[in-house]
């Protein structure tokens, strides 16, 4: 056995170790208590895979296998630039902007996978030989899925960032255009599969159609559905990476891509179920379109009851059971530490405090869990929707902080944009305090009927400032 053969065996073992790290790390991300360790373990697995690959390249070069002179500068620039940007964004991007960042990562992953396939296809064209049917399938699928993910993720990120309007943007004849693009892509792929001959012109048409398809697919989807779309595009990214693994015969890419693709698909299904909608319904066109501001008037002209800080503090301080419902408003204000301080203060007075977590609260799955974990809120106090809903009837006070659509009773009757969506049964509590800066509508674009409930008092304040005022008022009692 030559030195190169031995090293290749050891490198493949290292790749397998890295893949095991991905699997175990992903399984540990299933719980907020172990998610941090799971993330670190997955990163370590990737570091092992990259290190082993670098060693393999060095050994191949030492044994006389030529490596392009520009290869090492490209690798070095990629590691430094990619690692540096990743570290910078991870440390500086706020939790509220995390969905946009995830979407950009999806775009980078999908685009990189497509570039791998494009480069391999150009190599085959230059070689002047035929292409096996399996090679053509993997390359074409990689380019199509990666390109759709690239442009679709950029549009999704722009919608969440506010660079593009969050509401559904209907392109004239958009459905026909999308169908035509899909037909062009399929026919081009079939032509390549049947002929088995590399054809750059046809592949360029497929590439262009897929890039445009990503735009026309994502633009008509409203902001309320963007978390589901991002999760779906994340699944696309994983699938594209797996296809890239088949293209260059790299088992690490195949395993990592398959894991991301499968987990993204499962998450997409769970999120769609949480909204009581099908993925197909969401992709055809979502509801809603960003926050809008209305006057202090609820649905159908009904008035709301405004509540002062002192009145709210009295209700909370003398309650026995309080349920906190965190939402996007709490995340925007970075008020997780303030709500934990209020909860601890109430607990010191003998109040039982729990947190109601809706599956799609915030802008991505687990958003509220991670946010509250940052503030060291005890995990047992975080209750999922199915567990907490039966407890609202026994709650003396439900404190809603920035949550909107996920508490709207309009979801229980037909004929509204949120009809059928499972919600938190906040209106079943004995008393309700809603903390918001204004009567702004949620992403569904409709008034929240909870605000006009006779049991509801509206405390108009920024989440962080309002919670600080509540803490001071409770201490003064």
Image: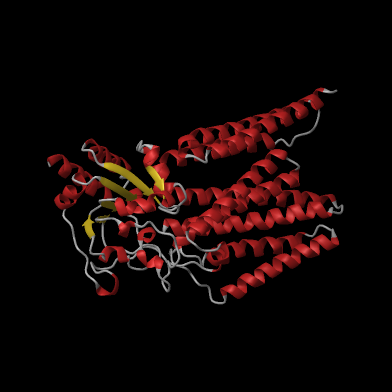
Q: Is 368 situated above or below 159?
A: above
Picture residue at 55% right of the left edge, 68% below the top: 284
- Give the left or right position of residue 365, taking residue 454 as reference: right
Colour convention of the picture: secondary structure
Residue 213: % across, % down: 61, 65
Q: Nearer the viewer, residue 187 or 58?
A: 187
Residue 152: % across, % down: 56, 59
Residue 57, picture quadrant: top right
Residue 263: % across, % down: 59, 47
In the picture, the quarter occupied by the N terminus is top right
Residue 401 visible in image: no
In the picture, the quarter occupied by the C terminus is top left
Picture residue at 40% right of the left edge, 66% below the top: 412
Q: Nearer the viewer, residue 10 or 346?
A: 346
**Identity of the residue furthest to the bottom in this view:** 173
- Give the left or right position of residue 104, taking residue 18 as reference: left
Residue 334 visible in image: yes
Picture residue at 28% right of the left edge, 68% below the top: 294
Q: How many marks?
A: 0
**Identity of the residue furthest to the left in this view:** 477
Q: Nearer the viewer, residue 64 or 347?
A: 347
Residue 138: % across, % down: 75, 52
């Amino acid at each position: 056995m030559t030195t190169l053969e031995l090293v290749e065996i050891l490198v493949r073992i290292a790749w397998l170790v890295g893949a095991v790290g991905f699997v175990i790390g992903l399984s540990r991300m299933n719980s907020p208590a172990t998610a941090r360790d799971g993330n670190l373990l997955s990163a370590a697995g990737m570091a092992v895979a990259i290190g082993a690959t670098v060693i393999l390249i060095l050994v191949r070069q030492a044994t006389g296998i030529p490596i392009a002179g520009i290869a090492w500068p490209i690798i070095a620039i990629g590691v430094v630039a990619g690692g540096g940007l990743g570290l910078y964004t991870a440390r500086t991007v706020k939790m509220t902007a995390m969905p946009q960042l995830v979407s950009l990562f999806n775009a980078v992953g999908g685009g990189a996978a497509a570039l791998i396939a494009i480069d391999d296809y150009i190599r085959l064209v230059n070689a002047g030989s035929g292409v096996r049917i399996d090679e053509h399938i993997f390359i074409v699928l990689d380019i199509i899925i990666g390109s759709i993910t690239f442009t679709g993720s950029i549009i999704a990120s722009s919608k969440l960032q506010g660079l593009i309007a969050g509401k559904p943007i209907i392109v004239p004849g958009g459905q026909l255009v999308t169908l035509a693009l899909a037909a062009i892509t399929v026919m081009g792929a079939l032509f390549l599969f049947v002929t088995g001959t590399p054809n750059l012109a046809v592949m360029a048409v497929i590439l262009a159609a897929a890039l445009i398809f990503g735009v026309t697919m994502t633009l008509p989807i409203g902001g309320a559905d963007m978390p589901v779309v991002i999760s779906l595009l994340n699944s696309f990214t994983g699938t594209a990476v797996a296809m890239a693994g088949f293209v260059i015969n790299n088992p690490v890419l195949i395993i990592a891509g398959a894991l991301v693709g499968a987990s993204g698909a499962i998450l997409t299904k769970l999120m769609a179920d949480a909204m009581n909608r099908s993925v197909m319904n969401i992709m055809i066109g979502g509801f809603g379109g960003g926050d809008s501001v209305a006057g202090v008037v609820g649905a159908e002209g009904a008035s709301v009851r405004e509540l002062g800080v002192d009145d709210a503090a009295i209700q909370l301080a003398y309650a026995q059971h309080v349920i906190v419902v965190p939402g996007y408003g709490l995340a925007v204000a970075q008020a997780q530490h303030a709500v934990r301080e209020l909860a601890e203060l109430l607990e010191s007075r003998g109040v039982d405090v729990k947190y109601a977590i809706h599956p799609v609260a915030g802008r991505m799955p687990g958003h509220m869990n991670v946010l509250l974990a940052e503030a060291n809120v005890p995990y047992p106090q975080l209750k999922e929707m199915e567990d907490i809903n039966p407890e609202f009837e026994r709650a003396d006070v439900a404190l809603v902080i920035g949550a909107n659509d996920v508490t709207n009773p309009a979801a229980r009757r037909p004929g509204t944009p949120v009809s059928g969506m499972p919600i938190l049964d906040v209106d079943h509590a004995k008393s309700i305090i809603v903390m918001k800066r204004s009567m702004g509508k949620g992403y569904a674009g409709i008034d929240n009927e909870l605000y006009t409930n006779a049991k509801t008092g509206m405390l108009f304040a920024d989440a962080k400032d309002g919670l600080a005022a509540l803490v001071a008022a409770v201490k003064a009692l």
